């Protein structure tokens, strides 16, 4: 499943499109069903957070006694309107298309600086030397964090170890203890950041968020910290893996890489969407039935959970011709990798821009880029799909 989940996804999508998983939830995998569930805000939403988590651990489990779950319960992605609407509005205000477009020269500068370093080193691990660095530096820039802050490596590691609470399963006791500890590391760091901007304001998003305090619908201090952790994490994990998954896919189909190299500016946007479709860095998300409803003619009872298998929908032959072929010139815009409906990815514009610049500059400057292995190691976990390392040469 880790190396190549797509044969299993195809099997479930074709044979059992409304699958009842042994974990106690439904799984939908056809494009029309994944899209249908995510777009249908009347019947599906996030529902009761505590009950959703207890599904995996049992009815006695102390959900809110776990700092990592308590944090997750406050993330606006996990909430329904009206709370979701209010916080999302404040966040999307910082990520409008206009503000994101204005970041292009800076993102290009960051990407070029990282490529300069790779060239000077002579060899590189694309994941740690480029794919992670680019979005981390962009998020640091946005929030006003010094990218050379000595605490940053611990903050980045803490994101990976605490975001495991998004997984739709019971964590092992060790995983849960680590997630609880690491969320504390993140809270301390962002509390420090906001306290600092309170006393010494700067021209950055952290200051803008702090200064929105006092306005009628502004974020409370705790909400600020929760939003910042969520944005920082959402802003780099998925984007980093999009870049890594794209370079791996391009390496495996050399004629696609050669076309990109022949016209990077024209073909980079399509490379981004095709990477998102073909090898999405987010494999699935989930919803809860808000009331009794139906899927594919079957009754779904209020409170039941549905896993929407984005990775399977993206290869549905009903929507994409020859879906297992990686083709940067096809129209892949209908992929579901940014979700849909009221929770549609708030950072899609930024992620697309980072991806476009990354693929464009890599193709321009490292025309011979190639993965050193065809069988790299995938990171642990199911929901987030990405490589733990990708040694490359050029
Ligand atoms: C390739 C990169 C990315 C992918 C594949 C991705 C994917 C997604 C998906 C599928 C959702 C919806 C989840 C659901 O409905 O359950 C989502 C939501 C979200 N994403 Fe992204 N994302 C990416 C990059 C980013 C970036 C760069 C940011 C911020 C800077 C970001 C911020 C968010 C936020 C705040 C939400 C929650 C929106 C809401 O609940 O209203 N994402 N993302």
Image (cartoon, helix red, strand yellow):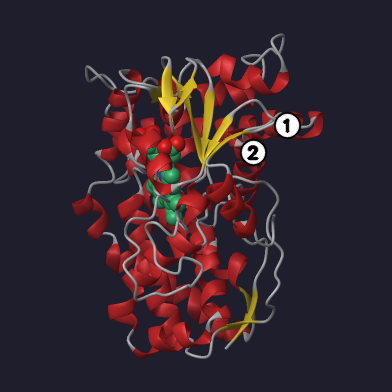
The mark tally for this picture is 2
Quarter of the image where one finds residue 108: bottom left
Residue 29: where, in percent of width, then height? 50, 45
Q: Residue furthest left?
A: 98
Distance from label 2 to label 1 (Cα)?
8 Å
Name the residue at 30% across, 54% down: 349
Out of 394 and 137, give the one closest to the viewer.
Answer: 394
Is the Cβ of the residue at disc 2 closer than 8 Å to that at disc 1? yes
Reading the image, the residue beneath label 1 is 171
Q: Position of residue 202 (x, y in %)?
A: 32, 43
Residue 112 as seen in the image, left or right of residue 284: left
- Seen in the picture, residue 134 relative to 168 is either above or below; the reply is below
Q: Is residue 144 visible?
A: no
> Which one is in front, 134 or 294?
294
Q: Residue at x 59, y 43 (%)?
A: 159
Mark 2 Cα-neighbour bin, 10 Å: few <14, some 14–19, many ≥20 = many
Which of the 4 image quarters holds residue 177? top right
Is disc 1 surrounded by few (<14), some (14 to 19) or many (20+) residues within 10 Å? Answer: some
- Rendered location of residue 64, percent (x, y): 61, 14
Between 128 and 82, the one lying in front of the other is: 82
Q: Is residue 57 above or below residue 316?
A: above
* Residue linked to disc 2: 164
Say what secondary structure mark 2 lies in: helix
Q: Residue at x 64, y 83 (%)?
A: 123
């Amino acid at each position: 499943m880790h190396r190549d989940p797509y044969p299993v996804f195809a099997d479930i999508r074709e044979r059992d499109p409304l699958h009842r998983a042994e974990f106690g939830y439904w799984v939908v995998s056809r494009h029309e069903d994944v899209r249908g569930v995510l777009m249908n805000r009347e019947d599906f939403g996030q529902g009761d957070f505590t009950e959703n988590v207890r599904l995996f651990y049992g009815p006695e489990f102390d959900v809110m006694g776990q700092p990592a779950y308590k944090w997750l319960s406050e993330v606006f992605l996990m909430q329904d309107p009206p709370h979701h609407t209010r916080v999302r509005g404040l966040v999307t205000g910082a990520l409008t298309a206009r503000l994101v477009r204005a970041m292009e020269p800076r993102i290009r500068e960051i990407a070029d600086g990282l490529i300069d370093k790779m060239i000077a080193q002579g060899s590189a691990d694309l994941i740690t030397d480029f794919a992670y660095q680019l979005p981390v530096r962009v998020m640091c820039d946005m929030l006003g964090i010094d990218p050379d802050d000595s605490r940053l490596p611990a903050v980045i590691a803490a994101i990976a170890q605490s975001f495991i609470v998004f997984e739709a399963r019971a964590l092992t006791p060790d995983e849960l203890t680590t997630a609880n500890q690491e969320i504390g590391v993140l809270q301390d760091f962002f509390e420090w950041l906001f306290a600092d901007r309170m006393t010494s304001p700067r021209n950055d998003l952290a200051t803008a968020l702090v200064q929105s305090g006092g306005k009628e619908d502004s974020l409370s201090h705790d909400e600020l910290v929760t939003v910042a952790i969520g944005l920082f994490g959402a802003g780099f994990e998925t984007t980093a893996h999009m870049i890594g998954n794209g370079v791996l896919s391009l390496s495996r189909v050399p004629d696609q890489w050669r076309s990109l190299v022949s016209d990077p500016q024209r073909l980079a946007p399509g490379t981004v969407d095709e990477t998102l479709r073909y090898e999405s860095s987010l494999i699935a998300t989930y919803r809860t039935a808000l009331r009794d409803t139906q899927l594919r003619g079957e009754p779904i009872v209020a409170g039941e959970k549905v896993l929407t298998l984005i990775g399977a929908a993206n290869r549905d032959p009903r929507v994409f011709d020859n879906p297992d072929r990686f083709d940067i010139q096809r129209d892949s815009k209908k992929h579901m990798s940014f979700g849909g409906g009221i929770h549609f990815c708030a950072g899609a514009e930024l992620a697309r821009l980072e991806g476009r610049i990354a693929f464009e500059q890599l193709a321009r400057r490292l025309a011979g880029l190639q993965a050193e292995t065809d069988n790299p190691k995938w990171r642990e976990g199911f929901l987030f799909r990405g490589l733990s390392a990708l040694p490359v040469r050029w």
